[in-house]
Amino acid sequence: MPVSRKRKKKPGKSGRPRQPARVDQRGSAAELSGHDRRELAAALQGMAVYREQVQEGRGSRATAAATDLVTDLVTVAANQPDVIVEDALCLRLGTLLSESERDPIDERPGPDHLASALVTAAAAAVEATTGDADAWRAPWQVLTAVAGILPYPHGETVAEEIRRLRDSVVARVPLGPTVTGPVRWTRDRYGSRFAVTAPITTADRPARWYLWDIDACGHQAHTVHSGYYPTPEAALTAWQTGVGPTAAAGTELAPVDDPRLLSDLLPAIEGFLRVGGENAEQFAEYHRSRRLAEVVKEKLRQRKTRPNRGLDAATAAAEFTTWLRARAAEGQQLPEDLDEFVTELADSWCINEIDAVYATCSPHRVALCVQHVRGYYLDDFAEQLVTLLPDWIRWLAARNSTPSELADRCLPYAEGKPHPQITGNDKTEADYLARVIE
């Protein structure tokens, strides 16, 4: 018996991980009595007061942590090159973010709290030394390092502080990071894991190559590793190691030929309280990877290229249905309401809305899809979708001319095998920031 469309989804599921469902209370409130409405208003007011207290507490903890960080870094900055100060800032900020993950959620300062507090603390450190002929130099280095790693909107705020303070310390305004050569990229054999690298010059120092290791298999493109390398070859080798020999075999860097896809892939401010990450290394680059992504996007913004639109869910559903019906003519059994099941599977396959990677298929992408389907749909409906996944993989492999050795590695996960590298610590949510070796 087919599952009714009205009964196929689990209550409270929106189809996107970690996105809260909206609740429209206007209609129900109209049916409440005067007493109930007053109680509801009081409850909502109490929640608003509590949220304000939580925000104040997070801000206070961020201020204390940022002040200590700046104070310590000022002592380290003396006689050190700017690049050393910036790297030390990232490492210490990463430690703070990593340690805050262990705090209760209502007490945990997020990356935005710490970024704002850093700007204030660094500016205050400079102001405290403006009466001394030389004491301002180390705090100024810290302030300019903060400017070098913070993305919008915090980058705008720290730039204003630098302009405000530069006359009192008679210091030059830092130029900030710039891309001083071609941006290059590659993708793995599955097509959904990317290496992006660019030569970045900061504070008149020699260029270093920054690497973004981007996994587009989940509900959005996630940067699972980033950092500086001395050469593009070293960056590529590090990426290949993180991807694994099967998926990375034969990969080479090439000039970016689709700036719009690159813009979709590079990290941006997410607005989440929780940063996430496997280790302090990921936390350390949380802000800087976004700051440098802004610089890369700006460099490529003027290039006019036709975007690779790729495959979309509607086209995929139509093509897959046709492919299935052709196989049915050879004796394969198909489920009732095939069109409905295929439409839902196609919608669930690529919820990051990056059509250029829609047709890609990797083992952990299949495992993530199964986890999403089973968490989003009612059990009977979910199992019908999972039953279609092996054929979906074979269809994608035929459509993309995927080598059979790669397609075969995906099939066990389509049959429900859990992927050990994407299982979160609580065993219930996927770890989208895992650096998966395929």
Image: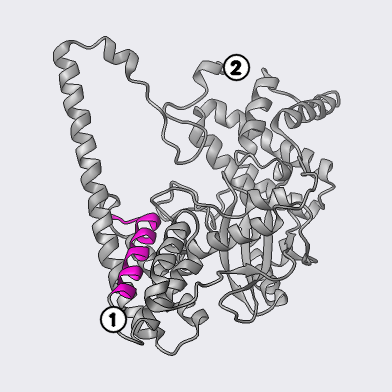
Q: Amino acid at mark 2?
A: Pro
| Residue stretch in magenta | 108-127
The circle drawn on residue 2 is: 2
Residue drawn at x 51%, y 65% is 288
Percent coordinates x, y for residue 371 in the rendering: 53, 42
**Residue 82 part of the magenta segment:** no
Instruction: Determine which quarter of the picture holds residue 52.
Output: top left
Instruction: Determine which quarter of the picture holds residue 166.
Output: bottom left
Majority secondary structure in the magenta region: helix
Q: Amino acid at mark 1?
A: Gly
| Residue placed most toward the observer, 193 or 158 | 158
> Colour scheme used in the picture?
one colour
Percent coordinates x, y for residue 291 in the rendering: 54, 61
Percent coordinates x, y for residue 47 in the rendering: 22, 35
Which numbered disc flags the more N-terminal residue, 1 or 2?
2
The circle drawn on residue 131 is: 1
